[in-house]
Image (tube, grey):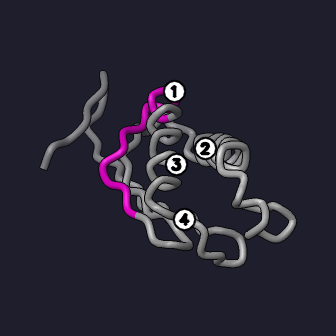
Amino acid sequence: MELDTNNHSVFLLNYHLVLVIKYRKKVINNEMSNRLKEIFEYICPKYNITLDEWNHDKDHVHLLFRGYPNTDISKFINAYKSASSRLIKKEFLSIKTQLWKEYF
């Protein structure tokens, strides 16, 4: 087991997050999943988070990531959800017709 360290502590903080599409609509394909992963990897370094595993199905995404004790997880998740929703709806125009009121 590989532990993370900082100046005064040794820790291992793993998080498992499942993000579900509104109303469980089956809209995620491989291309969209890859783009969602790219967005996640772009935002990660700003919050001291490292992605360990990424999986998806047609209506949800599973994330396994590691953080630090001083990482504000709620702000990170809020930033990721808002950025990914905005960018996915902008880049994949067909998704707007599949979702009700464009909620992602």
What residue sits 44% from the left and 49% below the top?
Answer: 34
Q: Which residues are magenta?
A: 44-55
Q: Which residue is mark 2?
A: 80
Name the disc covering residue 17, or none: none
What is the x, y in percent for residue 90?
A: 72, 43
Amino acid on which the number 4 mark rests in the picture: Ile
What residue sits 20% from the left and 41% below the top?
Answer: 3
**Above-or-below relation of 96 to 20:** above
* Distance from the alpha carbon under mark 3 to that under mark 2: 9 Å
Residue 100 location, quadrant: bottom right
Q: Residues within 10 Å of mark 2 (few under 14, many from 20)?
A: some
Name the disc covering residue 36, or none: 3
Q: Residues within 10 Å of mark 1 (few under 14, many from 20)?
A: few
Amino acid on which the number 3 mark rests in the picture: Leu
Nearer the viewer's eye, disc 4 or disc 1?
4
Name the disc covering residue 46, or none: 1
Asked if the residue at tag 2 contacts the one at tag 4, i.e. Cβ–Cβ closer than 8 Å, the answer is no
* Distance from the alpha carbon under mark 4 to that under mark 3: 10 Å
Q: Which residue is mark 4?
A: 28
Q: Residue furthest right?
A: 101
Amino acid on which the number 1 mark rests in the picture: Lys
* Distance from the alpha carbon under mark 2 to that under mark 1: 11 Å
* Distance from the alpha carbon under mark 4 to that under mark 1: 26 Å
**Above-or-below relation of 9 to 27:** above
